[in-house]
Image (cartoon, rainbow, N blue to C red):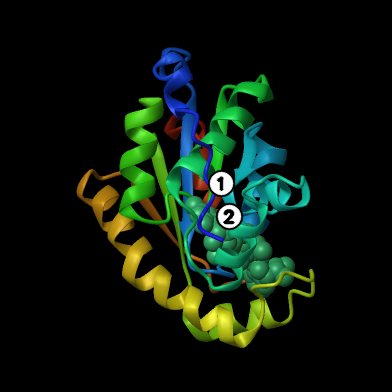
Amino acid sequence: MGTVVDAAPIKETNGSLAEKKPTVVFVLGGPGSGKGTQCANIVKHFGYTHLSAGDLLRAEIKSGSENGTMIQNMIKEGKIVPSEVTIKLLQRAIEESGNEKFLIDGFPRNEENRAAFEAVTGIEPSVVLFFDCPEEEMEKRLLSRNEGRVDDNIETIRKRFRVFLESSIPVIQYYESKEKVRKIDAARPVEEVFESVKAVFTPKSEKAD
Ligand SMILES: Nc1ncnc2c1ncn2[C@@H]1O[C@H](COP(=O)(O)OP(=O)(O)OP(=O)(O)O)[C@@H](O)[C@H]1O
Ligand SMILES: Nc1ccn([C@H]2C[C@H](O)[C@@H](COP(=O)(O)O)O2)c(=O)n1
Ligand SMILES: [Mg+2]
């Protein structure tokens, strides 16, 4: 069967999200770099709502949605799901949250994600966190994650690494050119990484001299 995507236009809420002026931080980094782990810490300390694009897509599969099979197949292959599907899930989660500060984890994964999100929502990120980690360390973490994810096997992990290099790094470079990227050395223990993350979220006036 061909790819199923919702035929309804996703522009229904166009502009309204931007009018609410939410603060959005994109959280990027290779598979297993620790995005989800650090987002959980940021939520506790700084009151953001964590929206993981991968988690939203996995929930969509479980919900029995008509796009479930397509999403499942793409995740198994380490491929990126069409932007209209992922953006719709993100828009809904933002609108339902009641918060105005969001960590959007694992999105945008490619140029199509980036441009479509901006066009549809009118939102630009205030900051882009980039968790920088060597592949060897990410591979070790993913192979011992034990959460039963269909993509945590060596064959899919290698495909995800390739997609990250080919499609996601250019997005990080785009935001570097806009001076929005805060690069974090993610190869250290969780607590040390979070010390660097905290510095990004702490206003200059509150930092010790
Ligand atoms: N700094 C760290 N040192 C060692 N292990 C870590 C570190 N950060 C996270 N982990 C572990 O590595 C695994 C992957 O972490 P996490 O799920 O946060 O990564 P992710 O970037 O969200 O990955 P994905 O892109 O696949 O969702 C988890 O088992 C987590 O407990
Ligand atoms: N913007 C996104 C984010 C995720 N996906 C798919 C493809 C990924 O390999 C998978 C898992 O994401 P993760 O939990 O590792 O962030 O979900 C996508 O297609 N588009
Ligand atoms: Mg994750």
Q: Which residue is mark 1?
A: 198
Whether residue 193 is visible to the viewer of this picture, yes or no, is: no
- Asked if residue 16 is positioned above or below residue 124 in the image, the reply reads above
What type is the residue that disc 1 sits on? Lys
Residue 189: where, in percent of width, then height? 64, 70
Q: Residue at x 66, y 46 (%)?
A: 66
Q: Residue at x 36, y 56 (%)?
A: 110
Q: Residue furthest front?
A: 1
What type is the residue that disc 2 sits on? Glu
Q: In which quadrant of the rendered view does residue 43 lie?
A: top right
- Asked if residue 31 is positioned above or below residue 7 in the image, the reply reads below
Does dot 1 land on a helix, a strand or a loop? helix
Q: In which quadrant of the rendered view does residue 130 lie?
A: bottom left
Q: Quadrant of the C terminus?
A: top left
Nearest to the observer: residue 62 or residue 158? 62
Residue 67: where, in percent of width, then height? 62, 49
Q: Residue at x 53, y 70 (%)?
A: 78
Asked whether disc 2 touches disc 1, contact meaning CB atoms under 8 Å apart, the reply is yes
Residue 206: where, in percent of width, then height? 51, 32
Residue 129: where, in percent of width, then height? 45, 51
Q: Residue at x 67, y 19 (%)?
A: 98
Question: Would residue 54 be found to the left or right of residue 169 on screen?
Answer: right
Residue 195 bears which disc, if any?
A: 2
Q: Disc 2 and disc 1: Cα gap in Å?
A: 5 Å
